[in-house]
Image: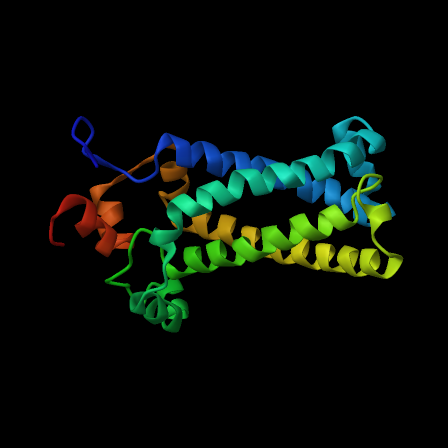
């Protein structure tokens, strides 16, 4: 796990990084096109994708692509996202941690905030996929009664908003934690970064005590 030539530790494999950025790009498209479809005020965003008709065609296909990208990845990393007693302690001291008044000593590969983000995305992406299929014109929507379509549309919009907020917090936290973005771009972190932010994971991958 250690990179001897540069004294770095591999944190994310190439496959993990490619999937992560693919999910991010698909989400950005879905968010912008979803806003354009949600309210006429935002319909000008459709010009970013050529035309409103082309955007309407691509949006549900991108939604299916998001699920196909995310769930195989989730199966690979779910063990690292299991909730542990150390995560409960992290949540309990979250505000002190943000003020740098508390340092979590048993954080694994992912901290509690990252795990909460992961486990929120598991059901939300599934709900977005299911509700999106119900309102998918002209292929599936005519198969459902109007009341079901309206309810699915509202739930779809609500889940999209929750996911937008969650990913916004995720991006801010990554920017706030110096070195996190580099880890997802280059795949590696320094020993010092790993010891400080994810000490339990550091001990696991290096066999060293802090």
Q: Position of residue 64 (x, y in %)?
A: 64, 39
Q: Quadrant of residue 156?
A: bottom right
Quarter of the picture holding the N terminus: top left
Q: How is the image coloured?
A: rainbow
- Residue 70 versus residue 5: which sits nearer the camera? 70
- Residue 126 versus residue 62: which sits nearer the camera? 126
The residue under the point 83% across, 29% down is 51
Position of residue 209 relative to residue 72, above or below, is: below
Quarter of the picture holding the C terminus: bottom left
- Residue 164 in view: no
Position of residue 8 relative to residue 158, above or below, is: above
Q: Position of residue 8 (x, y in %)?
A: 22, 35
Count every numbered label the image shows and give the total: 0
Q: Is residue 83 left or right of residue 154?
A: left
Q: Position of residue 4 (x, y in %)?
A: 16, 30
Q: Is residue 40 left or right of residue 58?
A: right
- Residue 63 in view: yes
The residue under the point 46% across, 31% down is 18
The residue under the point 83% across, 33% down is 52
Residue at the far bottom in the pictured view:
92
Q: Position of residue 114 (x, y in %)?
A: 43, 55
The residue under the point 30% across, 69% down is 85
Position of residue 185 relative to residue 180, above or below, is: above
Q: Is residue 101 left or right of residue 51?
A: left
């Amino acid at each position: 796990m250690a990179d001897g030539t540069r004294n770095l530790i591999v944190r994310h494999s190439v496959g993990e990084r490619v999937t992560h950025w693919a999910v991010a790009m698909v989400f950005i498209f879905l968010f912008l096109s979803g806003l354009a479809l949600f309210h006429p005020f935002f319909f000008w965003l459709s010009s970013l994708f050529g035309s409103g008709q082309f955007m309407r065609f691509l949006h549900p296909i991108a939604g299916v692509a998001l699920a196909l990208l995310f769930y195989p990845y989730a199966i690979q990393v779910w063990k690292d996202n299991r909730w542990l007693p150390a995560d409960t302690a992290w949540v309990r001291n979250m505000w002190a941690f943000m003020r740098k008044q508390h340092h979590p000593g048993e954080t694994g590969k992912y901290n509690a905030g990252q795990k909460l983000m992961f486990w929120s995305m598991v059901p939300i992406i599934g709900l977005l996929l299911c509700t999106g299929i119900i309102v998918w014109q002209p292929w599936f929507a005519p198969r459902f009664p109007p009341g079901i379509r309206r309810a699915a549309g509202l739930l779809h919009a609500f889940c999209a908003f929750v996911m937008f907020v969650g990913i916004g917090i995720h991006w801010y936290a990554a920017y706030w934690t110096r070195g996190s973005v580099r880890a997802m771009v280059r795949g590696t972190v320094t020993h010092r970064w790993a010891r400080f932010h994810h000490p339990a994971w550091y001990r696991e991958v290096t066999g060293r005590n802090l």
